[in-house]
C-alpha cells in the first residue's frame, strides 16, 4: 500500500487552489439557476422529506437541468493508490488534475458528492476480505450504505457495485479470464467442486447484487416507473432510425474519450445539432469508432488474459472508465443529452490511472526519464493556464454561452441562451439577432420561435410577435384523441399557447380566441397549472368571476402551497363582492408567505374599507410590513396616511402623505388629500401650494379646483381667482352642480344679485331635490326685494359634495399576479376608500350700506337678525348637525 505523503498532498491542494481561485468571482449561471436559486427544495421553510419526494434531477443525466460540466477529483482520488502501490502518488495526482479541463458550475457538486461516496464505498469493500479468505461483513454493510448514499447524490453511484465485483474476482481472488473459464468448465463437467474461495466470492457477490437490485427497485418507485420526457432536440440520435441511431451512439464513445485526452474545446451544452448524425457506413467518423473499439479491445484482452500488477491496473482503470459511463451511454434508456462533460467525473479516474500507469512505464526507462518529466511539467503548466482561462468563461451566462458558440455553432440552444443572457440585460435588439439565428440553425425548434415572439413583444412589435408564436404553434404535435400528451410534448413548449393567448387578449375583440388557446393547453396537459392561472386572469377580464374562481380552484388542486394562487383567488372574491372570503384567502397567502407584498397591501386596504375600527391596527401593521418590503412604493405610504386621517391623527397623516409625494411627485390622490387635510385643520393657506402642484399635473381636477376656489374666496379674499376656478369647472362640465352653485356665490359677493338669482335658478334646475339651493335662492330674492342695501351677511357657499368624500386612494391596488416567472400583473378593479369631510365654500361677510334714519336702521336690524338665524340654520343643516 502506498503511503500518503503530506508534502505531496499539500502541493496538490495548493496547485488546485491556484488553478481555481478566479472561480470565486463567478456567479450562478446556467443550471445553477434552476438547481439552486429557483429550487424550492433548498428553501429553509421546505420540509426535509420533500428532498426525497421531489426527484429534481430525474433519471441519470436527464432533461434540461442536467449538468454540462465536471471537475477533477484531485483531492479525492489519491486514495486509489491504496490499490496500486507501483504508482507514485505525485505522478498520479498531477495527471489526474492536468488531464481535465474544468469549469465552475456549482451544480457539479452532485457528481462530486456521488464520486466521494463512490470511492468510499469501493475502499470500504476492499477491506471485506479477512484472514484465510474469510468474509468481513462490516465493510460489506458499510459498502451497501455508501452505495445508497452515492446513488442519492447521482444515479451512476450505483455502478460502484460492478467495480466491486470485478475487484473481488480479478484482484482479491487473483483470477484471470482463462483460469475462471477453466474452473467453471470443470465444475460444469462434474470433474471438480467449487473451490471454497470461489464459494466465498459468490456469497459476497450475491449480497452485493441483491442490494443493488433493491436500490434499483426503490429508485424506480421514486420516479414512479416513468422515465423523464425528452424531445428529439435533447438527443436527436435517440429518435433516429437504424442504423443512424447505432452508428451515432457508438461514435459518441470516441468523442468522450477524446474529451478526456484533449480537453481543449469544451462546451457547456452538447445537445441538439452539436454532433451531426452519422447516417451512412461510409461516414469517415466511423473510422474513429473502429479505432476506439480496437484499442479498448486490446486493453481488455491484456487485462483479462494475463496476471500481474500491470494487467490488474489496466483492468481497474478500464472498469472505472466504462462501468460509471454506462448510465449515460443510451444502452438501457435514452438520456437527455448528446455529450455531457460532467458524466466523465468518475470515468476520468480510470483514465488518469491508465495514463499515469503508462507514464510511469516510460519514466522508468533511463533514456526517457528526463524527457517524460519535462513533458509532464509542460502539461501541468499548460493545463493550469487552460483551467484559469476556462474559469472566466463561467463568470456570467453571456460569457459562458459565447465561449460555447466558439466551439459549436450548430446548436440552436446555445444561440437561444446567448439571447436569454442579453434579454436579461434588457438588450432586446441584440437578443433578437441571436434568437433569429437559432431559428435558422434549427427551423423546427419550437422554443426558438417562442423566444423570437417574446422579444418582438418586448419591442412592441406585436404583429411580428404573433406571427412567431403562430409558427411555434404550427410545429406542435397534432391533436390525437386519447393520447397522453404529457409524454409527447415538452412542458415548456406548451407555453406557446399561453404566450400567444396573453398577446392577443390585449385586443378586446379577441378574448374568446385567447380563452380557446388556454383551454387547448389544458386539454393537452390537464395538470398544466399555468394555463389555469392565465385563464383565470382572462375570465376576470371578461367579467366572469365565477368561472375564474373555478380556474383558480383547479390550479390550487395542483399546488395548494402557492401563495400567489391564494392571492388571485382573493381578488376573485372581491369581484364577487365577498370581502370576508377575500380576506380569508389573503390571510392564507400570508400564512404561506408572510412577506407576500400584494397580499399585505390589498388585505390592508380591504380591512380599511370594511369600516371596522378593530381591524385598523392590523391594517396599519400590514401596510408597515408592505413598505418594509417595498420602500419605494408610494401607495403604501399613501394608504397609511389614509388610515391616519380616518383616526384623526393629522400629524401622522401629513407625514405619510408627504413621503408618498416625495416618492411620486404627481401622486394625484396624495396631493389632493394632503390639501384637504390642511383645509380641515385650519391650515388653508398651506393647502394652496399643494393644490397648485396638483393642478399643474392635473389641470382638470374638478374637486381640486373647487377646494382652491373656496380657499381663495374665503381665506385670500381673491374673488376673481375663485371665479376663474369655478368657471373652469363649468367649461369642462357645464352640469356640475357644485361648481355652478359656487359661481353663484361669487356673483353674490360681487353684488350682482340678479345674476346670482339667475345662476341659482339654473343650478336648481340641475338639482331640483337639493333643498340648500332653494334656500339660498330665497335669500337672494329676499335681498333683491329689500327696500335698501344695508350690510347683510352673505350666505355660505353651501353643500359641496364634490369635496365631500374625496379621499381617494391609489387606483392600482388590485392586481392579479401571474406565475412563473417573470409574470405580468393585471389590474382588476379600482379600490377607493371614501371618507366624508364636509367643507363649505363660503363665509359670512358684512357689506357697506347707505346712511338711514333710526327707524330704518331698526327695521334693517330686525331683518339682519332674522337673516342671521336663517343662515345659522342653513349651516347646521349643511354640517349635518
Image (tube, helix red, strand yellow):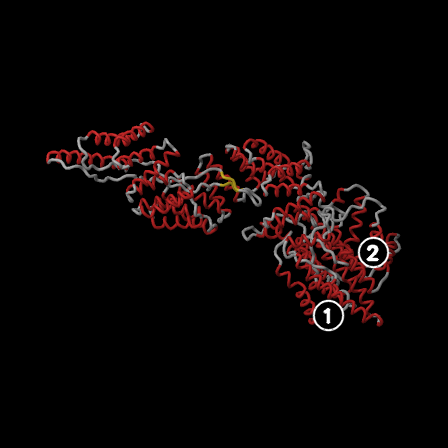
Q: Which is more toward the observer, 205 or 745?
A: 745
Quarter occupied by the C terminus: top left
- Report the side of 313 relative to 21 (left or right): right
- Report the side of 757 relative to 180 (left or right): left
Question: CB under 8 Å between callouts 1 and 2?
Answer: no
Report helix, strand or loop for mark 2. helix
Label 1 and label 2: CA atoms lie apart by 31 Å
Q: Circle 2: is it few (<14), some (14-19), or many (20+) Cα within 10 Å? A: few
Q: Residue at x 34, y 38 (%)?
A: 724
**Residue 622 screen position, x and y as percent:** 43, 48
- Report the side of 617 relative to 180 (left or right): left
**Residue 878 screen position, x and y as percent:** 28, 36
- The image quadrant that residue 477 belongs to is top right
- Report the side of 711 relative to 103 (left or right): left
Q: Which residue is mark 2?
A: 296
Q: Which residue is mark 1?
A: 3
Question: Of circles 1 and 2, which is in front?
Answer: 2
Q: Which is more toward the observer, 422 or 571?
A: 422
- The image quadrant that residue 100 belongs to is bottom right
The answer to whether residue 758 of the structure is visible from this angle is yes
Report helix, strand or loop for mark 1. loop
Q: Residue at x 48, y 39 (%)?
A: 571
Quarter occupied by the N terminus: bottom right
The answer to whether residue 142 of the structure is visible from this angle is no
Q: Circle 1: is it few (<14), some (14-19), or many (20+) Cα within 10 Å? A: few
- The image quadrant that residue 528 belongs to is top right
The single residue placed furthest to the left in the displayed view is 854
**Residue 455 screen position, x and y as percent:** 61, 43
Q: Which is more toward the observer, 284 or 177?
A: 284
Amino acid at each position: 500500500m502506498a503511503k500518503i505523503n503530506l508534502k505531496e498532498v499539500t502541493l496538490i491542494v495548493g496547485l488546485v487552489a491556484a488553478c481555481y481561485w478566479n472561480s470565486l468571482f463567478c456567479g450562478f449561471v446556467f443550471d445553477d439557476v434552476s438547481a439552486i436559486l429557483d429550487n424550492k427544495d433548498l428553501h429553509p421553510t421546505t420540509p426535509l422529506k420533500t428532498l426525497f419526494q421531489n426527484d429534481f434531477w430525474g433519471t441519470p443525466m436527464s432533461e434540461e437541468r442536467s449538468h454540462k460540466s465536471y471537475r477533477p477529483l484531485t483531492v479525492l482520488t489519491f486514495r486509489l493508490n491504496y490499490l496500486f502501490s507501483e504508482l507514485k502518488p505525485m505522478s498520479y495526482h498531477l495527471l489526474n488534475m492536468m488531464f481535465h479541463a474544468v469549469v465552475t458550475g456549482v451544480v457539479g457538486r452532485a457528481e462530486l458528492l456521488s464520486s466521494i461516496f463512490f470511492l468510499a464505498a469501493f475502499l470500504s469493500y476492499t477491506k471485506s476480505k479477512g484472514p484465510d479468505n474469510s468474509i468481513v461483513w462490516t465493510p460489506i454493510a458499510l459498502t451497501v450504505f455508501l452505495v445508497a448514499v452515492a446513488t442519492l447524490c447521482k444515479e451512476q453511484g450505483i455502478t460502484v457495485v460492478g467495480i466491486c465485483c470485478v475487484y473481488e474476482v480479478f484482484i482479491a481472488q487473483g483470477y484471470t479470464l482463462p483460469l475462471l473459464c477453466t474452473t467453471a468448465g470443470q465444475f460444469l463437467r462434474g470433474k471438480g467442486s467449487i473451490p471454497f474461495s470461489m464459494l466465498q466470492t459468490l456469497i459476497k457477490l450475491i449480497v452485493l447484487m441483491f442490494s443493488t437490485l433493491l436500490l434499483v427497485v426503490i429508485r424506480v418507485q421514486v420516479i414512479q416507473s416513468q422515465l423523464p420526457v425528452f424531445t428529439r432536440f435533447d438527443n436527436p440520435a435517440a429518435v433516429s432510425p437504424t442504423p443512424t441511431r447505432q452508428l451515432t451512439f457508438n461514435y459518441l464513445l470516441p468523442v468522450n474519450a477524446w474529451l478526456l485526452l484533449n480537453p481543449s474545446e469544451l462546451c457547456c451544452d452538447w445537445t441538439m445539432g452539436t454532433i451531426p448524425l452519422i447516417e451512412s457506413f461510409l461516414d469517415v467518423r466511423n473510422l474513429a469508432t473502429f479505432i476506439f473499439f480496437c484499442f479498448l479491445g486490446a486493453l481488455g484482452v491484456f487485462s483479462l488474459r494475463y496476471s500481474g500488477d500491470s494487467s490488474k491496473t489496466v483492468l481497474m482503470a478500464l472498469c472505472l472508465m466504462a462501468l460509471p459511463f454506462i448510465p449515460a451511454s443510451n444502452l438501457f434508456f435514452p438520456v437527455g443529452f448528446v455529450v455531457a462533460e460532467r458524466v466523465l467525473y468518475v470515468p476520468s479516474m480510470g483514465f488518469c490511472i491508465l495514463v499515469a500507469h503508462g507514464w510511469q512505464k516510460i519514466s522508468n526507462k533511463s533514456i526517457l526519464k528526463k524527457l517524460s518529466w519535462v513533458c509532464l511539467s509542460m502539461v501541468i503548466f499548460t493545463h493550469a493556464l487552460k483551467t484559469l482561462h476556462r474559469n472566466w468563461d463561467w463568470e456570467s451566462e453571456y460569457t459562458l454561452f459565447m465561449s460555447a458558440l466558439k466551439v459549436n455553432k450548430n446548436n440552436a440552444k446555445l444561440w437561444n441562451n446567448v439571447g436569454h443572457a442579453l434579454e436579461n440585460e434588457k438588450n432586446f435588439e441584440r437578443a433578437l439577432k441571436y434568437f433569429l439565428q437559432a431559428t435558422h440553425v434549427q427551423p423546427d425548434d419550437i422554443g426558438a420561435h417562442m423566444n423570437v415572439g417574446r422579444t418582438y413583444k418586448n419591442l412592441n412589435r406585436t404583429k411580428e410577435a404573433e406571427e412567431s408564436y403562430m409558427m411555434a404553434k404550427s410545429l406542435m404535435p397534432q391533436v390525437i384523441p386519447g393520447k397522453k400528451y404529457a409524454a409527447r410534448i415538452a412542458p415548456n413548449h406548451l407555453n406557446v399557447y399561453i404566450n400567444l393567448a396573453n398577446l392577443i387578449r390585449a385586443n378586446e375583440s379577441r378574448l374568446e380566441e385567447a380563452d380557446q388557446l388556454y383551454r387547448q393547453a389544458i386539454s393537452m396537459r390537464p395538470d398544466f397549472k399555468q394555463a389555469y392561472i392565465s385563464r383565470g386572469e382572462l375570465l376576470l377580464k371578461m367579467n366572469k368571476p365565477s368561472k375564474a374562481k373555478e380556474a383558480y380552484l383547479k390550479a390550487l388542486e395542483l399546488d395548494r402551497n402557492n401563495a400567489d394562487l391564494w392571492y388571485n383567488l382573493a381578488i376573485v372574491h372581491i369581484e364577487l363582492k365577498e370581502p370576508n372570503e377575500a380576506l380569508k384567502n389573503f390571510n392564507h397567502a400570508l400564512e404561506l408567505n408572510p412577506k407576500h407584498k400584494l397580499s399585505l397591501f390589498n388585505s390592508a386596504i380591504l380591512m380599511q374599507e370594511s369600516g371596522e375600527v378593530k381591524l385598523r391596527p392590523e391594517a396599519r401593521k400590514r401596510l408597515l410590513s408592505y413598505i418594509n418590503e417595498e420602500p419605494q412604493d408610494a401607495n403604501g405610504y399613501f394608504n397609511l396616511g389614509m388610515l391616519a386621517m380616518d383616526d384623526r391623527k393629522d400629524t401622522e397623516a401629513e407625514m405619510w402623505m408627504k413621503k408618498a409625494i416625495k416618492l411620486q411627485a404627481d401622486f394625484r390622490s396624495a396631493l389632493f388629500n394632503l390639501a384637504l387635510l390642511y383645509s380641515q385643520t385650519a391650515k388653508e393657506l398651506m393647502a394652496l401650494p399643494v393644490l397648485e402642484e396638483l393642478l399643474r399635473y392635473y389641470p382638470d381636477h374638478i374637486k381640486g379646483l373647487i377646494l382652491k376656489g373656496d380657499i381663495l374666496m374665503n381665506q385670500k379674499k381673491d374673488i376673481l381667482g375663485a371665479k376663474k376656478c369655478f368657471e373652469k369647472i363649468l367649461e369642462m362640465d357645464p352640469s356640475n352642480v357644485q361648481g355652478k352653485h359656487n359661481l353663484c356665490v361669487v356673483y353674490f359677493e360681487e353684488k350682482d344679485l340678479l345674476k346670482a338669482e339667475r345662476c341659482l335658478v339654473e343650478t336648481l334646475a340641475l338639482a331640483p331635490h337639493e333643498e340648500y339651493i332653494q334656500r339660498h335662492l330665497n335669500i337672494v330674492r329676499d335681498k333683491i326685494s329689500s327696500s335698501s342695501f344695508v350690510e347683510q351677511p352673505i350666505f355660505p357657499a353651501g353643500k359641496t359634495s364634490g369635496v365631500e368624500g374625496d379621499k381617494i386612494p391609489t387606483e392600482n391596488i388590485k392586481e392579479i399576479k401571474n406565475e412563473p416567472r417573470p409574470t405580468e400583473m393585471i389590474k382588476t378593479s379600482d379600490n377607493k376608500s371614501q371618507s366624508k369631510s364636509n367643507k363649505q365654500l363660503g363665509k359670512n361677510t358684512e357689506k357697506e350700506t347707505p346712511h338711514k334714519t333710526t327707524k330704518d336702521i331698526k327695521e334693517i336690524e330686525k331683518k339682519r337678525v332674522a337673516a342671521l338665524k336663517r343662515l345659522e340654520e342653513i349651516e347646521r343643516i349643511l354640517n349635518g348637525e
